[in-house]
Amino acid sequence: MYLSCLLVALSFHSALSTTCPRRCSCDPAQSVQCYRATEIPREIPLTTRRLYISHSKIKQLQFTDFRRMSVLEELVLSCSGTESIENNTFKALSSLKSLELCKNQLKQIPTFLPSGLEILRLADNSINALHASDFAGLMKLRVLDLRNNLIATLPPSAFSSLYNLQSLILDGNNMESVSVPLRLPRLKYLSMADNKLNSFPTNFFASFQSLHFLSLSGNFLTKIPLDLPKSLLSLKLEKNQLKMVRLRDVKHLENLSEFLLSENQLTSIDGENTGKGDSQKIDPGKY
C-alpha cells in the first residue's frame, strides 16, 4: 500500500513539474517560450533555465513573478510593453547570467540586479538617466547594451563597478558631451554612434588599454579624439564633421586595420588636398 501511494505521489509531482503553461512551448532542455501573455505565467516548470517571452502585454514585472525560478540562467522579455519593474524583482535569481528587456517602455535601469549577471541588454527603451547605484555589485558583467534610449549624460561613477565589462553599446541616445574618463580597463568594444557628441575631454580614452573596436559614427566631431589607445583594430568616424585628418593623431595606432571616414567634410590629410570633400576609407597601412 505504501509503495503504491509513493508511486502515485511521484507520478503526480512529475506531471506538475512538466506542465507547460498556455501559449507557451516547453522543451526537455529546460527552455520555455511564451507569447501574447498578459502576465508572467504561473505554471512555468521549476527546472526552467531559459525563459523567452515576446510580443506580449505585460506592463509591470513583480518580485512574485520570478521567485520560484531559482535555476533560471537566461531571461528574455522583449516587445511586451513593459513600463515598470518592482524593486527586487530579479534579486532572488542567483543563477541568472543573461537578462534582455529590449523594445519595451522602461524609463530606468531595474534595481538590485543579481551579482552573477554577465549580459544585460536594455536597448530600445525610454531610459533617460543613469545613476551611480544602477550597476552596483555587477562585477561579472561583460556586455551592457543601452542603445536607442534617451540617455543625455554619463555620470562619473555610473560604471565604476563594472571592472570586467568588455562591451558597451550606447548608440542612438541623446549624449552631447562626456565630462570625465571612464575606468573600464577590460573594455574591448565601445560604440557611441548616432549621438550628438562634438568632443571628448583629455585622457577620456586613456584607461581603455584593451579596446579593439571604437565607433563614433554619426556625431558632430570636428577632429579626431586624442589619446586613442594603441590596442585599436577598428576606428569608425563616418558621418561626422571632420575637415582635416592629422596623421600624428593616429600614427601611434600601429595595430589599426580599419579606419572609416566616409560622409565627413574632409578637404585635406596633413595638408594634402584630398581632391574631394569626402573620404570613403583610409588604409592605415599606407602611413
Image (spheres, helix red, strand yellow):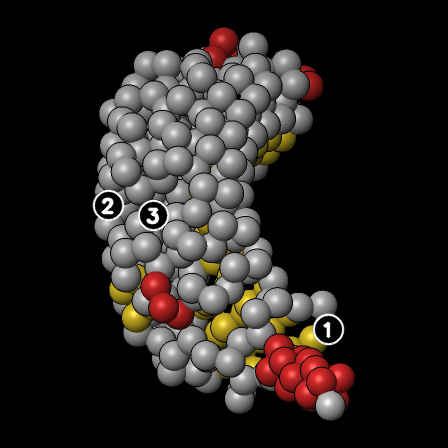
- Please, what secondary structure does the residue beneath circle 3 have? loop
- The percent coordinates of residue 50 (x first, y second) are 59, 64
Q: Which of marks 1 and 3 is nearer the N terminus?
A: 1
Marks 1 and 2 sit apart, C-alpha to C-alpha, by 41 Å
Q: Callout 2, which amino acid?
A: Ala
In-image side of 22 versus 111 (left or right): right
Marks 1 and 3 sit apart, C-alpha to C-alpha, by 31 Å
Image quadrant where one finds the C terminus: top right
- Please, what secondary structure does the residue beneath circle 1 have? loop
- The percent coordinates of residue 210 (x first, y second) are 56, 22
Residue at image point 36% right, 27% down? 160
Dot label at residue 28:
1
Q: Are marks 2 and 3 in contact (CB under 8 Å)?
A: no
Q: Nearer the viewer, mark 1 or mark 2?
A: 1
List the residue tagged with mark 2: 129
Image quadrant where one finds the N terminus: bottom right
In-image side of 248 versus 108 (left or right): right
Residue at image point 71% right, 85% down? 2
Between residues 118 and 87, which one lies in front from this camera angle? Answer: 87
Is 68 rendered above or below residue 91? below
Residue at image point 32% right, 55% down? 88
Task: Specify the quadrant of the image occupied by residue 217.
Answer: top left
Is 86 rendered above or below residue 222? below
Residue 269 in sight? no
Q: Callout 3, which amino acid?
A: Phe
